[in-house]
Amino acid sequence: MEPITAPAIDLVSLAPVLVLSVFGIMVLVTDLFIGKDKSVLVFISLTGLLMGAISSLAKYNLPVHSFNGAYIVDHLSVFFTFIFCISSALAILVSVDFNKREGIKVGEYYSLILFCTVGMVLLASATDMIMIFLGIEIVSISLYVLAGIRRNDPKSNEAALKYFLLGAFATGFLLYGMTLLYGSTGSTKLVMIASAIRNGGVASEPLLLMGVVLLIIGLGFKVAAVPFHMWAPDVYQGAPTPVTAFMAVGPKAASLAAFYRIFSEAIPQLSPSWEILLCVVSVITMFVGNLGAIMQTNIKRLLAFSSVAHVGYLIIAIIAKNSLSSSALMFYMLTYAFMIFGTFGIVILLGRKGDENLEIENYSGLAYKHPVLALSMTIFLLSLGGLPPLAGFVAKFFVFSAALKEGFLILVIIAVLNSAVSLYYYLKVIVFMYMKDPVKEFDITLSPMTLFVIAISIFGTIQLGIFPDSIIALAQAN
Amino acid sequence: MELLIFYPLAGLCVAFALGVVINNSPVGSAMSLIAMMLGLAGIFVLQQAHFIAVLQIIIYAGAIMVLFMFVIMLLNLKGSGEDASWRSRDKNLLMTVLSGFLVAGLLYKILCVLNSGEFDSPASLPENFGTAREVGTILFTEFVLPFEVASILLLVAMIGAVVLAKNKVD
Amino acid sequence: MLLKLTGLVPLFPLIGCIINGFLGLRIGKNAVGLIGAGAVGLSFLTTLFIFAGLVMTPVEERVFEQVLFTWMSAGDFAVDFGFQIDPLSMTMMLFVTGVGFLIHVYSIGYMHEEYSFYRFFAYLNLFMFSMLLLIMGNNFLLMFIGWEGVGCCSYFLIGYYFEKKSACDAGTKAFVMNRVGDFAFLLAVMYIFNIFGSIDFTTVFHAAPEKLIYDGETVTIITLLLFVGACGKSAQIPLYTWLPDAMEGPTPVSALIHAATMVTAGVYMVVRCNALFALAPLSMTTVAFVGGGTAVFAATIGMTQFDIKRVLAYSTVSQIGYMFLAVGVGAYTAAIFHMVTHAFFKACLFLGSGSVIHGLHGEQDMRKMGALKDHMPITFITFFVSTLAIAGIFPLSGFFSKDEILYHALMDGNVILWGMGITGALLTAFYMFRLVFMTFFGESRVDPHVHPHESPKVMTVPLVILAGLAFFGGALGIPLFHGWHVLHNWLEPVFHFDMASALEHSAHLLHEQGKHAPSLTHLLEPAEHNLWVEVALMALSFSIAVAGIFGAYMCYIKMPHLPASFTKGQWGYDLVKNKYEVDELYDETIVKPTLEGSTLLWKEVDAKGIDGSVNGTAKTLGWLSNHARTFQSGFVRNYALFMVVGFISLLIISL
C-alpha cells in the first residue's frame, strides 16, 4: 500500500475563511463565559470581520489558483469579500439595539453571521461545483436559523420553516443540475467543464442543457429570481428586520458571484442556449418585482419585492458577461449594501418593542418630526429607484451599459422602463413621509449604533454616486 | 444484463417514493422511505459505487431513519385519516390545461434526451473506482478543501439545531 | 480670467438650499427669503461676469470647458463632471438666473403667509441648482442629472399644498409623464454611448458626421428618442397633459418652472443636439409637426378654459410648440429667441396672475373677476404689456420672435407648418385678450366680500422689470438686416454645421456597406434671405394678431352674450372645453389597466403572505381549497409547485 502524497495546501489564500471561522468559534466560546450582556460578542465579531477583510489582501499577483483548481483568489473574490465583511458588519451594528429592544439574547446570533460570511467568501472564491454547493449550504443553513432566531414569535418561525423547506427543495434542483453537468463533462471544476465543452468532450448535449436549466433554478432560488422568488416576501417580512437586511445583501451578493462565475467561466460556450433563459428570467423578475411592489402596504414586503426587481437588473450583468459587467456587478452590490442597510436602519429605528411600525402609513408625517431621518430615507429610496446623482443610478447605468455593449438593446429598454416604474412605489413612501399628517406619535429612541449605520450608508450612497471613480477603478483592476 | 436488474430496482424506488407521499400513516411513510433507500443502494452497487452503497444503507436506512421512527413514535403522530385533501381538490380547468401543457413539454424534452443516443459509450471507469480506499484517497488529495469545508457546514448546522432546540425560550 | 468662475454659478443655489433646508425654521422668514433670493442673485451676478468674459474672447474660441473631476470611468468609458460654456448655454444661464432671481424676489412677498416658507425656498434653490446643471453640463449624463433633478423639484413643488388631494395627484401625474420622457432620454444616451464610446457633447457632436449616415436608421432612432424625452419635459403632444394640472402648485412655481425655465429644457436639449438632428431629416419633420400641432391644439383648449392659470398653462404648451416648430425647420436661433422672450412675458403673465389671485384672496376663476384694472393698476399695466407681447403686436418682443419663426416655417418648412403657426397666432391673440378682458375689463363679478387690492412692492417691482423686458426684449433680434440680429450673430458658432462634409462621410459609409448613396446636393444650396417676403409676412401676422384681439373685443366687451350663444349645445365646444377628453383617454387606456393589474397581482396573488398559517394545519387545508388559485398564498407547497412549473417552462423554452 503506497502512502498518499499530501497535496499542496495554500492556507494563505484561505486566510479570510480561516480568520472568520476562528472568530466565529471564539464568539461561541466567549458566549459561555459572559452573562446577558452580549456587547463583548459584538466587539469580537466586528474585529473578526475587520481582520477577515484585511486578510483577504494577503495574496497579491492575482489571480491565485489553489487546491487543485477548487479555489481562486482574484479581484472578484477579494472585492466581494470586502462587500461581505462590510455588510455583515453593518448587519451586526443594526442588530445591537434591535436585539436589545426585542429581547434576542442568543449569543450564537453573532457567530452565525460570521459563519454565514465564511460561506459567502467561499462562494465568491469557489471554482469547483462541490465548493459552490458547500458554500451555498453554509450560507443557507445559517440563514434558516437566523430567520427563525425569535423563537417565541410565530411569524419568525413561519419564515424560517418556509425558507428551510423551499430552500431544501431548491437545493435538490441545484444538486441535480450539478450532477448532470458532472455526468456530461466528467468534472466538477469550472475550468475543466469549460474545456470539455470546448473540446467536444460532452457525453450528452441535452443532459448538459438540462443541467444548466436546473442550475438556473437552484441559483435563481437563492437570489430570489422569479418564478423562484415566492419565499422572499414572506421570509423578508417574517424574519427579524436586521436579518432581513442582511439576507437581502450579503448572501444575495455571494450567490450572484457564484452565478456569474459558473456562467462566465464554466459554460460560456453554451451561452446561445442559456442567454435566452436568463433573459426571460430577468424580464419576468423585473416585472413581477416592480408590479408586485406597487400595491404593497408593508414596508418590508415592499422592499422584498424591490429586491426581487433588483435581482432582475443584476441578472442582466450575468447575461452580458464581459469585463465591464463583472465590475458593474461588484459596484452594484456594494452600493446596494449601503442603500439597503440605510433603509432598513431607518425601518428599525421607527419600530419599538412589540410594534414594529411596518405599515407604510406609519411613516406619515415623518418629515415634520424627524426631518433628517426622513431626508435620509428619501435619499436611500431615490437611490434605490436609480435617480442621479446617487449611487443607485451609477450602478444601474453601469450594468445597462455593459449589456448594451453586448447588444442586448431590448433587454436594456425593458430594464430602463422597469426602473422608471420602480420609482413610483419608492415615491409612495416619500409622499407619505412628506405629504401626510402623522397617524400616530413617533416614539423613537435614536440608538447610536443604528444611527451610525445610517450615517455610513448615507455617506456611501452619496459618495459612490458623485465620486464613484476610485471604487470603480478597484472593481476594474483585473 | 445490467438493465434487467436496474429497471426492477428503479421501479421499486419510484413506487416506494410514491408510497412515502401517499401513505396516510407517518410510520408507513417512513418505512417506505427506508425501502426506497435500500433500492437506491442497490442502484449504487450497480454503478460500481460499493462504498457509497454501504454508506447509504448504514447512514440513511440505518441511522437517520431509525431516528425518524423514534421521533414519530415518541410524538405519537397519527395519520391525518380521512382528510386526504389532495383527492377532493376543486377542479380547475385552467390549471389542468396548463399542467397538461407542462407535462407534455416535459415528456417531449425527455424524449429528446433519449433520442439523442449518446449514452451508448460510457467512458471506462478507472481502476479501483468506488472502493473505500479510492474514495478516501480522493477525499484527502483532490477534494481536501471541500472535505474540510464540510466540517464548517456541519458545525453551522449543529449550532443551528442547538439554537432552535434550546430548552428555554428567552 | 472671468470664465473660471463657472463653478460658482450652480454652487450658490446649492448652498442656499442647504442652509434653508436645514436651518430654515430657526433663522426666521426674513433671513430665509434673503438667503433664497440672494443665492440666485449672486448666481446671476457671477453669470454676468462670465458673460463679460465670454464676450471678450474671440468668436472662434467661445467654447469653454471646465472639468471639475472625473465622475466615473470604466475601461474605455469615462464621464467627466464638467461644465461647458458657449454662447448657447450662456444665453440660457443669463435668462434662467435673471428671471429666476426676479421670481425669487416675488416669492418673498407671495409666499409670506405660508408656514413652511423655508421649505419652499429650499426646493426653489434646489431647482435652480438642477436647472443650471442641466444647462451647463458638458455631457449627456450630467444633463440627465439636471433633467431628473428639475423633475423631482417640480414634483415636490407641485405637491407643495399637499393637503389638497388634487395637488398630490397632479404631482404624481407630472412625475409619471416625465418618467416616460426620461426613460426615452436615458435610452438615447446609452445608445449614443454605444455608438460613439463617449457621451461628451464636444466629442459626440464632432464625431457625428463621421459615424452616422445621413437619414440613417441609427441617427433617426437616437434623435426620436431624444425628442420623446423633450416632449415629456416640455409638455408636447402626447405628453402634455401634466402641465395644466401642474398649476396646482404655488404661482411663482408655475412662473419659474412651468413657464420660463424647466419646460423649455426640452427645446434646449434638442437645440444642443442640433448636430445630430441635422442628420435626421425625418426626426426634424416630426419635431416640426408635433410642435406646430401642439401650438394649435393647446391654443384651442386655451380658448375655453376659465381658470386663469390654466389658460396660461395651455398658452405655455402652445408657445413651446412654436419653439419646437422653429427647431424642426432648423431655425435654432429663432427657437432660442422665442424661448428668451417667452420667458420674459410668460413669467410676467404668471406673476401678474399670481398678483391677481393674491389680491382676490385665492380666487382663480375668471368668471369671478372683471374690472380689476382700477384696483390693481400696476399689475394691469404690466399684464397688458406682456399680453401685447405674446399676441405679437409691433414692436414688442413677441412680435419679432414669433415672426421669425413664422418666416422660417414658410421658407425652410412648408405651407402647412406656416398655416399651423399663423392659426396659432390668431388663437393666441384671441384667448390672451379674452383673459385680459374677462379679468381686468367689463363689469366686476368679484365676490362682494372680497376687496381687491394691489400687491406689495416686493411683488410689483419684479413685474415691472419683467414687463420692461417683455417690451424691449425684441431688440435682441431685429430682423430685416442681417447684421442687426444680435442674437443670431451671437449664437452662430454653436449652430455651425458642415453639411457638405457630413454628406461626404455618409456617402462613404454607405459605399462601405455596398449601398448606393442618394444624391443630396440640394441640401447644400444656401438659403436666401428674402426681405420682401419677410416684410409681407410681418404685416400679415400683425394683422392676424389685431384680428384676434378684435375678435376677443367683440366677444367679451362689445357683445358679452355672443360667446354663450354660439357655444351652447355645441358638441365641438364641449369637446374642446373638456380638453378633448385626453386625460380620460389616458386614464382608461393606461392608468386604470396598470393599477388594476397591480391590484390583481396583489389581491389575488399576494394578499395572504405571512399570517402564522403554519401553526394550524387544519385551517391551512381549509384555506387551500378556498384559495387554490392564489399564487402567493403563503403556502409552501404552492410555492414549491410554482418552482416546478417554472422549471418545466424554462426547460420547454430551452428546447
Image (cartoon, coloured by chain):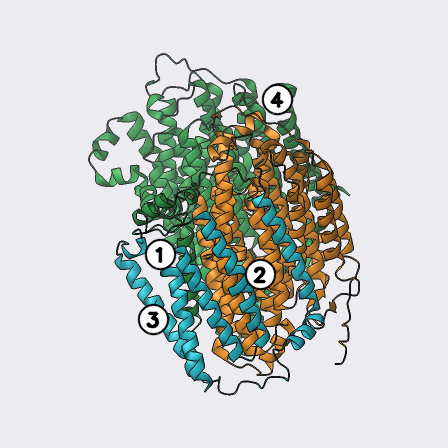
Task: Depth check: give the residue in front, A423 or B77.
Answer: B77
Q: Position of residue C373 (x, y in %)?
A: 42, 20
Image position of C9 with respect to B109: above or below: above
The amino acid sitting under disc 4 is Leu
Write down the residue under mark 4. C25
The amino acid sitting under disc 3 is Ala
Same-subunit check for callouts 2 and 3: no
The amino acid sitting under disc 2 is Ala
C562 left or right of C118? Answer: left
Write down the residue under mark 1. B24
Is any atom of residue C484 visible in this view? no
| Alpha carbon separation for disc pair 1 and 3 | 30 Å
Task: Depth check: give the residue in front, B159 or C101.
Answer: B159
Image position of C414 with respect to A186: above or below: above
Write down the residue under mark 2. A317
Eye-nearest disc, 4 or 2: 2
| Alpha carbon separation for disc pair 4 and 3 | 69 Å
Eye-nearest disc, 4 or 1: 1
Is any atom of residue A293 visible in this view? yes
Same-subunit check for callouts 1 and 3: yes
Disc marking residue A423: none
Write down the residue under mark 3. B104
C318 left or right of A123? Answer: left
Q: Residue at x 62, y 67 (%)?
A: A130
Q: Tell me the subunit letter for badge 2.
A: A
